[in-house]
Image: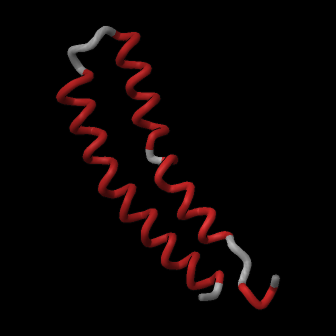
Amino acid sequence: MTQRTRKFIGTIAIITFVMLYGPVAMAIAESRIMAAPQVIQVISYAALGLAWIIPIMPVIRWMQRPDPDNI
């Protein structure tokens, strides 16, 4: 598979993931975090804001692999 194809597939996967993750994170924030103390709210919002990066990093690494014929 060429790098161009991997980037296309990876981009679609990332956009789909973020579109699904956003509403889930908002639902968690609205149902659980709103009643917490402000310090916990800040930490929770920061964690939810950064948590999407962890599952996306393998996809980005896969997308950036060079083509087999260019190695």
Instruction: Give the colouring mode of the picture.
Output: secondary structure
Q: Left or right of 21: which side holds 57?
A: right
Q: Number of marks in the image? A: 0
Q: Is residue 71 above or below residue 52?
A: below
Quadrant location, the N terminus: bottom right
Examine the image and state in which quarter residue 27 appears.
Answer: top left
Q: Left or right of 68: which side holds 8?
A: left
Task: Locate residue 15, reporting x and y percent.
Answer: 42, 64
Rendered residue at 82%/82% (across/down): 71
Examine the image and state in which quarter residue 19 appears.
Answer: bottom left
Task: Locate residue 48, reporting x and y percent.
Answer: 40, 35
Task: Locate residue 12, reporting x and y percent.
Answer: 44, 72
Task: Locate residue 22, reporting x and y percent.
Answer: 33, 48
Q: Left or right of 70: which side holds 12?
A: left
Q: Nearer the viewer, residue 48 or 62?
A: 62
Rendered residue at 43%/20% (across/down): 43
Rendered residue at 58%/76% (across/down): 7
Q: Is residue 71 above or below residue 48?
A: below
Q: Is residue 53 above or below residue 71?
A: above
